[in-house]
Image (cartoon, grey):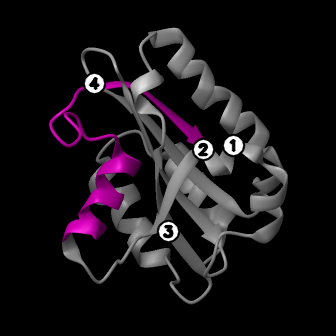
């Protein structure tokens, strides 16, 4: 998998996103060279103010800049009323989250991380929905979606 090819496909697909970008992602994805991770913010009960919640996500993405060559991420803020949920999907080069990311980006400890099992069709579909920003997402409207590429 060439990460820049995926990022370019993601950025340049304007129509038929599922048929073009999502299909292209799964065609490119190399489970031996890359891994997919779900993350859930540990303190969602604190997410009561919209702009503060969105700023938390924005700050996290800024601090993840050191991983730009090794990662692609999608962060969603969901819910119609507070507290809002912050959830994410990350594609990392390698079969584990890179150690330098865990060591250098202190926000990582604010999230519960679990590796996606792409052999489980439900998890694979969740990956696709997060990349595509399918709304409603898990029954909730998407308040904000940010992409790290």
Q: Is residue 39 magenta?
A: no
Residue 93 located left or right of residue 101: left
Q: Nearer the viewer, residue 18 or 54?
A: 54
Residue 36, labelled with which disc? Answer: 3
Residue at the image point whose x is 53% and y is 21% from the top? 54
Q: CA distance from mark 2 to mark 4?
A: 19 Å
Q: Work out whether mark 3 precedes mark 4 in sequence or the reverse, and give the earlier one.
A: 3
Q: Quadrant of the N terminus?
A: bottom right
Give the secondary structure at mark 3: strand
Asked whether residue 36 appears in the rendered view, the answer is yes
Q: Alpha carbon of mark 2 to alpha carbon of mark 1: how far?
A: 5 Å
In front of the other: label 3 or label 4?
Answer: 4
Question: Mark 2 or 3, which is nearer the eye?
Answer: 2
The residue at 54%/75% (across/down) is 35
Q: Nearer the viewer, mark 1 or mark 4?
A: 1
Pointer 2 local density, CA inside 10 Å: few below 14, some 14–19, many at least 20: few
Tell me where the magenta segment starts and ends, as one range: 122-148
Which numbered marker is on residue 79?
Answer: 4
Distance between the alpha carbons at the discs numbered 2 and 3: 18 Å
141 up-or-down from 130: above or below: above
- View extreme (bottom): residue: 32
Q: CA distance from mark 3 to mark 1?
A: 18 Å
In percent of the image, x 67 and y 38: which residue is there? 61
- For the residues marked 3 and 4, what is the alpha-carbon distance in whole angstroms? 24 Å
Q: Which residue is mark 1?
A: 107
Q: Is residue 97 left or right of residue 122?
A: right
């Amino acid at each position: 998998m060439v990460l820049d090819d995926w990022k370019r496909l993601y950025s340049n697909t304007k129509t038929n996103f599922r048929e073009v970008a999502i299909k292209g992602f799964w065609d490119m994805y190399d489970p031996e060279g890359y891994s997919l991770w779900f993350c859930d913010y540990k303190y969602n009960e604190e997410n009561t103010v919209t702009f503060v919640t969105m700023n938390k996500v924005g700050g996290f993405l800024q601090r993840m800049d050191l991983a730009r060559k090794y990662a692609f991420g999608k962060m969603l803020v969901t819910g119609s009323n507070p507290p809002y949920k912050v959830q994410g999907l990350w594609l990392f080069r390698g079969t584990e989250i890179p150690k330098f990311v865990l060591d250098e980006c202190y926000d990582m400890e604010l999230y519960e991380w679990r590796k996606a099992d792409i052999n489980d069709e439900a998890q694979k579909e969740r990956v696709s929905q997060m990349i595509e920003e399918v709304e409603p997402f898990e029954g909730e409207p998407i308040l904000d979606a940010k992409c790290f590429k």
